[in-house]
Image (spheres, rainbow, N blue to C red):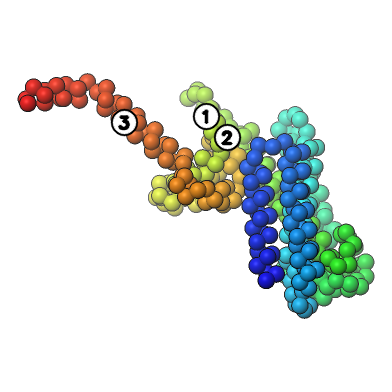
Amino acid sequence: MLSKFIGKLSTQLTDGLLDINVEKLSIEKRLAKALLLIRSLLLLLQEQVLLHPLKDKTEEIYFFKNVKPNFLAAKIFEQERYNLEQNKPVGTWKMLLAYYESELEIIRRYFRQYAYLYQYYRTGMTEMDELYFIRGAEVPSVLIPEFGEPDPKFSTCGDHLFAKFIAYEKLQEYILEQLRLGTLASQLTLPSTYQSKPLHWTGESINLVELGYGLLDSGQLNNGQAGVNDIFKWLEEHFNVSIGIPARRFVEIKRRKRLSRTRFLDNLRDSVTKKIEEDEEFNPEKLTSKRESKKGW
């Protein structure tokens, strides 16, 4: 029963944060809305664990090692992303590049500071699980130098640290994506032999997701050998737009109503069809052919 409830809450967390990120909100409103969602789900999770106690050590270790840290990590990531964007310098790309690189170094330093525990997290070690993920276990501070919020009924000495590892890895991925997109934008130059205006995608970025997966699954590029990352990097580079993580954006499309899941591609088809019909309607040769046909009758 508890596992089904956890699965439901995990889905609500993923889908809820995805919906919030799609909305065009200020960073302050986005943070407030995200934290409200995460805190409400954490509260529900805590209530269920207290109402339906974990049956043994194995279940308790799994919950505080793999389940709760994911919810805590979402909270930490949203707060860290807000701080990152709030403190972002306004200026040249060189200034922004230096800022992002310094933030990456802070994350790497944190991983180095807790090298053993980070390795424990990364490799899936289990030797110390009964100390790190059992409530009430007494652990020397030398083994866990950083604790989260003390709550003997709903926390262990290791769940908060694992949550920070998850959140910081996600933040690191986010910063690297901003660096990649910023580098692409800064390197966009026009060929000297062809002085045309650069093209920028001004439609919704989700429309490019439809287009990208259409190109991928129909095998239109490199004889069908182009991968999803290759296609979306190309689209981002040439249209100077941030699409985000393609798989996550594709979830938005799958969650649409069935009759309108490919509305952008449908609109493209309708626009081309309309253009063909208009051209045929005003084609002089076709009009002449119609007149001659009428004469024949």
Badge 1 or badge 2: first in the primary sequence = 1
Q: Nearer the viewer, residue 261 or 74?
A: 261
Kind of residue sitting beneath label 3: Ile
Q: CA distance from mark 3 to mark 1?
A: 25 Å
Residue drawn at x 78%, y 33% is 89
The 10 Å Cα crowd at callout 1, few under 14, some 14 to 19, many 20 or more, is few
**Residue wearing tag 3:** 276
Numbered mark located on residue 199 in the image: 1
**Residue wearing tag 2:** 240
Residue drawn at x 51%, y 40% is 207
Identify whether 22 is placed above or below 292: below
The spot of residue 212 in percent (x, y) is 49, 45
Question: In the structure shown, which secondary structural element does the residue marked by tag 1 occupy?
Answer: loop
Q: Nearer the viewer, residue 86 or 142?
A: 86
The spot of residue 204 in percent (x, y) is 55, 36
Residue contact between numbered discs 3 and 1, judged by CB atoms under 8 Å: no
